Amino acid sequence: MNIRISADSTCDLSPELIEKYDIRITPLYIVRDGQSLVDGKDITPDEIYAHVNSGGGMCSTAAVSVYDYTQFFRRQLEDCDAVVHFHISGDMSACYQNACIAAQEVGNVYPVDSRSLSTGIGQLVLEAVQLTREGKLTAQEIAHEMERRRELLDVSFLVERLDFLHKGGRCSGVALLGANMLNLRPCIQVKDGQMMVGKKYRGPYVSCLLQYIRERLKGRDDIDTRRIFITESGGFTPEELAQVEAAVRSYQPFDEVLHTRAGCTVSSHCGPRTLGILYFHTK
């Protein structure tokens, strides 16, 4: 059986990984001043930052429509037998719900709610690609296996600036003022399909990043060391990113450390200089 793996643009996989593994992408929409723009095509994260920093309003995201999914799935099935498609958490977007409606109409399409975002989704996508290459499971079985493995994901980001969260209504003015005065850097975690604030770090941002990485990785014996993503939203120097990778490699013997740039969804909510490490646990 020829099974195609595809995902929404929220998976934040790099163009190189998308090409290498032949992953097909459905873009979400970014709404800027009432205009609906195609994620990654009509607008980029840097253009979102420039718009907000120049006094423009916050951009929002809009789900892929049922019609868009229907057309996309039909095109894919012209040269494959089945499609397994991955989505941002259904608690964060209507994408999964819309895809399920389209899949029911088209047939041989298996939407997977990642219960995650960004390269947490990307981790599942790459696992699914590997299963298709092994050729032992049907498309439905791959979807079910990824629904099991999503429970093992560890997805978090450290945010430097709270102004984007504040402007987007996810952080009060009082919290913003207090965080700025105390030099606090909140960790945003994905739990049970939702984003929530975890530990708050205090001090210079790079020092906080290194502490965040150490606390998540050092001395752990339950981490799947095949692959980890370092996903960031731009604004870092090469030296800073090298420090981050060196820290990651010093705490766990990962086979692959993959760097990716966050797309418009994470970037529009968290702003520049947000960075996360995303990996699987073994249990």
Image (cartoon, rainbow, N blue to C red):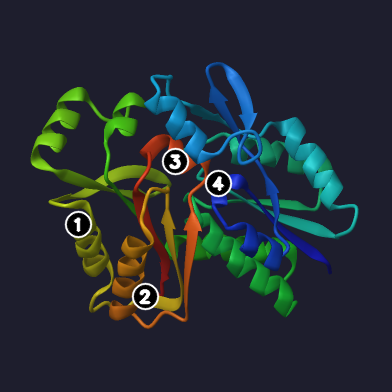
The residue pinned by badge 2 equals 223
* Residue 211 coordinates in the image, percent (x, y): 19, 63
How far across and how far down the image is residue 182, in percent? 9, 40
Residue 205: percent from left, percent from top: 21, 52
Q: SS class of the residue under badge 3?
A: helix
**Contact between labelled residues 1 and 3, with CB atoms less than 8 Å apart:** no
Image point 32% across, 74% down: which residue?
Answer: 246
Of callouts 4 and 1, the N-terminal one:
4
Q: Amino acid at mark 2?
A: Ile
Looking at the rendered structure, the kind of residue marked 1 is Cys
Closer to us: mark 3 or mark 2? 3
Q: Which residue is mark 1?
A: 208
* Tag of residue 10: 4
Which of the image's four quarters has the N terminus? bottom right
| Residue farthest toward the top in the current orientation of the protein | 34
Q: Which residue is mark 3?
A: 267
Q: Earlier in the sequence, mark 2 or mark 4?
A: 4
Q: Which mark is residue 45?
A: none
Task: Give SS at disc 1.
Answer: helix
Q: In front: 54, or 130?
A: 54
Above or below residue 15? Residue 170 is above
- Horizontally, is 18 left or right of 245 in the view? right
Q: Nearer the viewer, residue 143 or 176?
A: 176
At label 4, counting other C-alpha atoms closer than 10 Å, the crowd grade (few under 14, some 14-19, many 20 or more) is many
- Three-letter code for the amino acid on which mark 4 is drawn: Thr
The quadrant in which the C terminus is found is bottom left
Per the image, label 4 sits on a secondary structure element best described as: helix
Instruction: State left or right for residue 248 relative to residue 208.
Output: right
Residue at 23% across, 79% down = 219
Say few, some or many: other residues with alpha carbon within 10 Å of mark 3 (under 14 / 14 to 19 / 20 or more). many
Instruction: Tell us which disc is closer to us: 1 or 2.
Output: 1
